[in-house]
Image (tube, rainbow, N blue to C red):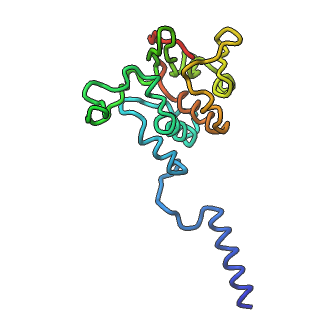
Amino acid sequence: MKHTTFSLSCTALLCALAAGAGPALAAEPEGAPANDRVAQGFRIVPKGVHLNMAGRDRNLVGLGSYLVNAAGACVDCHTHPTYLPGGDPFQGQDEQINFQQYLTGGRQFGPVIVSANLRPDGRGRPAGLTLWQFIKTMNTGHNPNDPPGEILQVMPWPVYGKLVQQDLRAIYEFLSALPSAPDNPNPGP
């Protein structure tokens, strides 16, 4: 009888935990990020960058920010200049990302390669790409807007191409949440 009571108690506890009725590790408001990477992603969105969260998956946007702003270091190549005056951590200053040019591209590599504008176009497409075009570009290095056979140079697409599709979707979702930069002179990828 004791074994059956214990089993029923454990089963009830597991069901309650699965249903969300069990004790939480930390009190989070409804709609709060689901894990540490997502929460960190929201903390590290550069000050001055306002996300459009309407109709977006909060967890994907947060994870995408984490991948773009921490793991991927996309700002280093796609924001020019990277830091605001007085905000360069390499000079011992408190970091201040150049939010006006955040991910608008424009960094030059050699005489002909310029980093792409990753911000959404007028249709809300990051770098002017649909989700599937973005994933294909990240997996193959082939930009659908370039001549056939041309492969992105400098961009570490062979590294990003190893990410799982869900991570690439999260990056796209984050980039989609950024405000567009219609007056930006830098093209998409």
Task: Determine whether 29 is above or below 52 in the image.
Answer: below
Residue at the image position 50 percent from the left and 17 percent from the top: 115
Residue at the image position 52 percent from the left and 63 percent from the top: 24
Quadrant (top left, top right, bottom left, bottom right) of the C terminus = top right
Q: Between residues 24 and 118, which one lies in front from this camera angle? A: 118
Q: Position of residue 45 (x, y in %)?
A: 42, 36
Q: Quadrant of residue 170?
A: top right
Asked if residue 41 lies left or right of residue 10, the reply is left
Q: Where is residue 38 in the image (x, y as percent from the top left)?
A: 51, 45
Q: Position of residue 185 (x, y in %)?
A: 46, 9
Residue at the image position 63 percent from the left and 27 percent from the top: 138
Task: Determine whether 29 is above or below 44 in the image.
Answer: below
Q: Where is residue 167 in the image (x, y as percent from the top left)?
A: 61, 38
Q: Between residues 16 and 40, which one lies in front from this camera angle? A: 40
Quadrant (top left, top right, bottom left, bottom right) of the N terminus = bottom right
Asked if residue 164 lies left or right of residue 124, the reply is right
